[in-house]
Amino acid sequence: MKYTDRVYGNFEITEPVILELINSPTLQRLKEIDQAGYFEPHFPGTAHSRFEHSIGDYLLLKNYGAPIEEQIAGLIHDVSHSAFSHCIDYVLNAGSEKEHNHQDNVFDDYVRKSEIPEILKKYNLDLDYILDDKNFPLKENDLPDLCSDRIDYSLRTATVFKEIENGKFFIDNLTAKNGRWIFKDFESAKKYAELFLKLNTNYYAGIQSAVMFRTVGDCLRYALSKKYISEADLYTTDKIVLSKIEQHINNDFKLKLLFERMNNKIGFKNDPINYDGKVFCKSRVIDPLCLHNGEIKRVSEIEPSWSDIITQESKPKEYFLKFDR
């Protein structure tokens, strides 16, 4: 299978288990799940899918020599995302606005109920081992550390939103040793940390994301309460959920209002004094490792002011949204 990735370039994927997983219904569904949630009304032309990111995570791990089990863990890590990705954390009480952890909370059960276990069994691969992130330090690490998931989605976001032309500079200056991602020098590590900070400020935890999360969450929650959609529908695709909601718009004034807000057709402002609703956004910041004067150091150890940024940016962002109507 020939595959062209916007961050890493051209690849040929030949491993039978990887090909079978990619072609499974569970992975294919991710082609219709927007990576950012529902950013297209705010940033036209920037839609990209969870499928693209999942393949990217796999390619990154493969390119840096991770074992096949870790490559698989990277490939399947997002299969439990609902329609509109992290917007689900603003719909169901099982999620968290501050942590964006609903997908992680349901992941194990979701995978076990899918066709993935049978595929792995066919290739004599241990499902329990692959589902345990403690086995895969390159694939998963807590903030502010790097992991393949974080590296891929940040370089992908930066490419899609034209903050960088592609990820070559960072990939060329990144190494993987003993389960750790390490930049070859301080300059490239600092440049990447600053890029990630910009992405967080402008996109991940910015005002447009706050509006997206709140309005999509409100619309879906209302549609659920009116039984226009079911909770099971949330685990189909963005298009399917939208089509079911759109059938009721002309007969429900409140739904129409919420749908127009969701589609960025109604103005808004951030007003802590007079607001319709408040919203939290998960905030992300990184502190990469790098080689510096023959030692492995964090950016914050070389430039202490970065510690203050980590402290500040690790806190969830809070917004107070007032809509024109």
Image: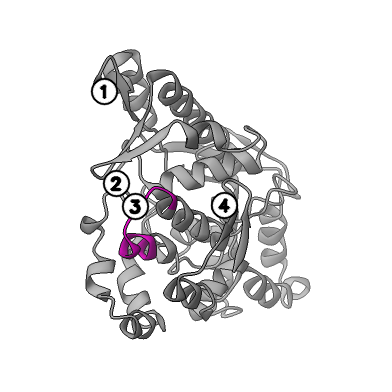
Q: Are marks 1 and 2 in contact (CB under 8 Å)?
A: no
Q: Amino acid at mark 4?
A: Ala
Earlier-in-chain disc, 4 versus 1: 4
Bin the neighbour count of mark 3 within 10 Å (Cα to Cα): few under 14, some 14-19, many 20 and up. Answer: many
Q: Amino acid at mark 3?
A: Lys
Residue 83 at what x, y percent from top left?
A: 55, 67
Would you identify the image quadrant in which residue 244 lies?
Answer: bottom right
Query: How many numbered marks does the figure carry?
Result: 4
In terms of depth relative to the viewer, which is nearer, 99 or 113?
A: 113
Residue at mark 3 to residue at mark 4: CA–CA distance: 20 Å
**Can residue 149 be seen in the rendering of this structure?**
yes
Residue 141: image tag: 2
- Establish if 168 lies above or below 34: above
Image depth: mark 4 or mark 2 in front: 2
Q: Secondary structure at mark 2?
A: loop
Residue at mark 4 to residue at mark 2: CA–CA distance: 21 Å
Q: Disc 4 marks which residue?
A: 36
**Can residue 97 be seen in the rendering of this structure?**
no
Q: Are marks 3 and 2 in contact (CB under 8 Å)?
A: no
Earlier-in-chain disc, 4 versus 2: 4
Q: Secondary structure at mark 1?
A: strand
Residue at mark 3 to residue at mark 2: CA–CA distance: 7 Å
Residue 215: image tag: none
Q: Disc 1 marks which residue?
A: 297
Q: Disc 3 marks which residue?
A: 139
